[in-house]
Image (spheres, helix red, strand yellow):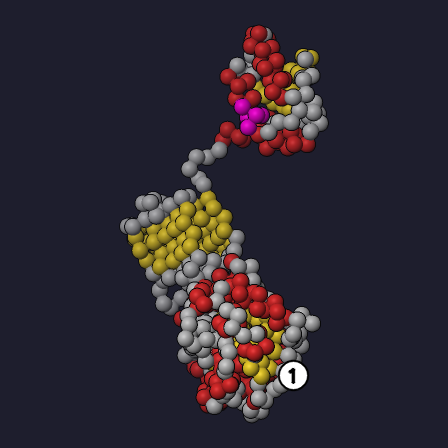
Amino acid sequence: MIGIVITITSGKGGVGKTTATANLGMALASLGQRVVCIDSDIGLRNLDVVMGLENRIVYDLVDVVEARCRLKQAMIRDKRFPTLYLIPAAQSRDKTAVAPSDMVHLCQQLKSEVDWIIIDSPAGIERGFRNALAPSDQVLVVTNPEVSAVRDADRIIGLVEAEEKGPAKLIINRLDPEKVRKGDMLSAQDVVDLLAIPLIGIIPEDEAVLVSSNHGQPVVLSEKSIAGQAFINVSKRLMGEKVPWLDLDGKKGILNRISKIFSGGS
Amino acid sequence: MEIKGIKDGILIHLEEQKWDDAKPVLMEQIIQKQAFFKGARLFLDVGNALLRAKELGDLRDTLANHGVILSGVLSHSNVTRETAHLLGLMTDLELPKPKKRNIIEPLDTVIEGEKAVFVHRTMRSGFKVSYHGHVIVLGDVNPGAEIIASGSVIVWGRLLGTVHAGAEGDEKAVVCALDLSPMQLRIASKIATTPQDQAEPQPEIAQIKDNQIIAETWQH
């Protein structure tokens, strides 16, 4: 078994990296995959909060790297899915506590144990981002349909290409079909046109995401949530399945056009 | 060493297998028989000797100083043949004559000061190209990317980033793109931005006219 390392990054903060990590981890685990999520945002950890595993942390990523514990001891098993684990970030240290080579070494050890290693990258393009990128097999860039987020995503994609970790795949998060129709928001097509990388998911704006994150119950767990459904679709696409694109507003719109263009994509 | 007259000029067979030994012998002959060689087109059969670009270039220049034109180099060595090709020299005697002239002469018509760099990729945010000369991009120039050129800038793609042509003061520099919608466009000391309401993208060229930057639809 050789696990695949997925790095989830964005450049800009607050676009939904952690939400995407938690939800993709849960979605893959719900499909029977063995998954480890790693929070590489040392000093500003919150993947544990979103996954609802905050109160179980004993050891963290820095403890593993500095050999204060064994790898297994830092892997927190999820309470809902027994094949899902979290390696939390340290809160009292900073990004320099871990080197890119540490991350590569860590992921090599994990690869023989699990199917997927999902790394939640910190915002920015500095050391923390380098740490998250170093072991990556597949980079997923998360962006929102707004100009500043797309600009940062473009920069990140350039850096990923420069490190020869490309081509990255794109997740457009928090798309509001209603606003797009009124011309108040960039369409998915606009974003894809500029960034010119394959699209792997469009996550619609959904109140349930905020509520569920606050409760530590990622949105994929609630069957009614359309965002949850979209995350499950992304995880299926990661596994190589062809999944039709969600019809987000029940009307023939931008997303239908996108789906035609990208239906061949993974 | 064997010298014989051929249709296209003079052919010399060098017997020495090492170039360091062969060259002095050759030059001695040339200098001794200057009257005979002057103005001649020389073909050199170097056998197995290995010649690199510098050696061959030096030879050509030295010969030229004595009024001898090095026209061709015959060799069994692929390296030497390749080098000769690079310098625009013939490597066979059989090549038709008119073509041979055409191969050699353009070397003297290199246009000065027209250097350009070719960027074959999408220039994403944070990517910067500065070049003393022209810049040609095959791909998009995204917002946040930057091109600075002392000459002109040509983008075969969408130009959405920042561009400065004629950055060292050349007011004749131009900027053209298939979709000319830069964040900011500078030519020499003039600055322009892209109007908000743009029609369908079309190839445009921007240049200084009447002391300001004007963008016009591309006309051929």
Q: In terms of secondary structure, what is the magenta stretch mainly? A: helix
Query: Which residue carries the number 1 mark?
Result: A31
Q: Residue at x 56, y 21 (%)?
A: B59
The stretch drawn in magenta includes residue A72: no
Quick check: B98 above or below A184? above
Quick check: B15 above or below A70? above
Quick check: B161 above or below B82? below
Please state the total of marks drawn on the protein image: 1
Q: Nearer the viewer, residue B208 or B53?
A: B53
Residue span colored magenta: B54-58
Q: Nearer the viewer, residue B118 or B78?
A: B78
> Measured from the top left, where is residue A151 in percent x and y?
43, 67
Q: Residues within 10 Å of mark 1 (few under 14, many from 20)?
A: some
> Measured from the top left, where is residue B108 in percent x and y?
50, 28
> Measured from the top left, where is residue A61 in percent x and y?
51, 73
Using the rendered image of the protein, determine whether residue B191 is visible from the camera's viewpoint: yes
- Give the left or right position of residue A237, taking residue B131 as reference: right
Q: Residue at x 62, y 21 (%)?
A: B19
Q: Chain of mark 1?
A: A
Q: Nearer the viewer, residue B177 or A228?
A: A228
Indicate the amino acid at tag 1: Leu
> Measured from the top left, where is residue B73 in percent x and y?
64, 24
Q: Residue at x 55, y 82 (%)?
A: A76
The stretch drawn in magenta includes residue B55: yes
Using the rendered image of the protein, determine whether residue B160 is visible from the camera's viewpoint: no
The quarter of the picture where the N terminus of chain B appears is top right
Q: Residue at x 41, y 53 (%)?
A: B147
Q: Nearer the viewer, residue B165 or B49?
A: B49
Quick check: B13 above or below A77? above
